[in-house]
Image: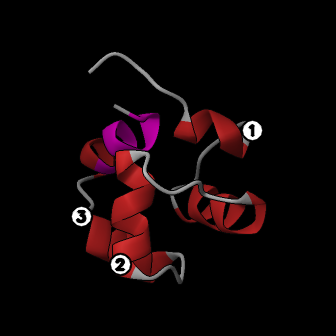
Amino acid sequence: MLRIEQELKKKGLSQAKAARMCDVNESSMSRIVRGVEPPYPKRGQRIADALEWRGDWRELFAEVEG
């Protein structure tokens, strides 16, 4: 599981809502959350900003214990 999935749950956000918040295609957001597609720097930063992530945006996409 990627940390972004935990953050979405913690904030009560669906992937669709998060995608709209950060101007990311819903199918891309789904692939990013599943770890199938990389977030890429600009998109990763937009996602981190929309989720009000503190710290390096890359940490949001790191593997964590589920």
Query: What secondary structure characterizes most of the magenta part?
Result: helix
Q: Quadrant of residue 58?
A: top right
Which residue is located at x 35 percent, y 78 percent? Answer: 26
Determine the residue located farthest toward the front in the rendered image: 36
**Residue 65, magenta (yes or no):** no
Q: Mark 2 or mark 3: which comes first in sequence?
A: 3
Secondary structure beneath label 3: loop
Q: Pointer 3: what residue?
A: 14
- 30 relative to 40 in the view: left or right: left
Are discs 2 and 1 less than 8 Å apart at CB? no
Q: Pointer 2: what residue?
A: 26
Residue bounds of the magenta highlight: 2-8
- The amino acid at mark 1 is Asp
Q: Quadrant of residue 28?
A: bottom left
Circle number at residue 4: none
Which residue is located at x 59 percent, y 46 percent? Answer: 53
Q: Nearer the viewer, mark 2 or mark 1?
A: 2
Give 19 or 1, whichever is nearer the viewer: 1
Q: Where is residue 15 shown, x and y percent of the image?
A: 29, 65
**32 versus 65 height, above or below:** below
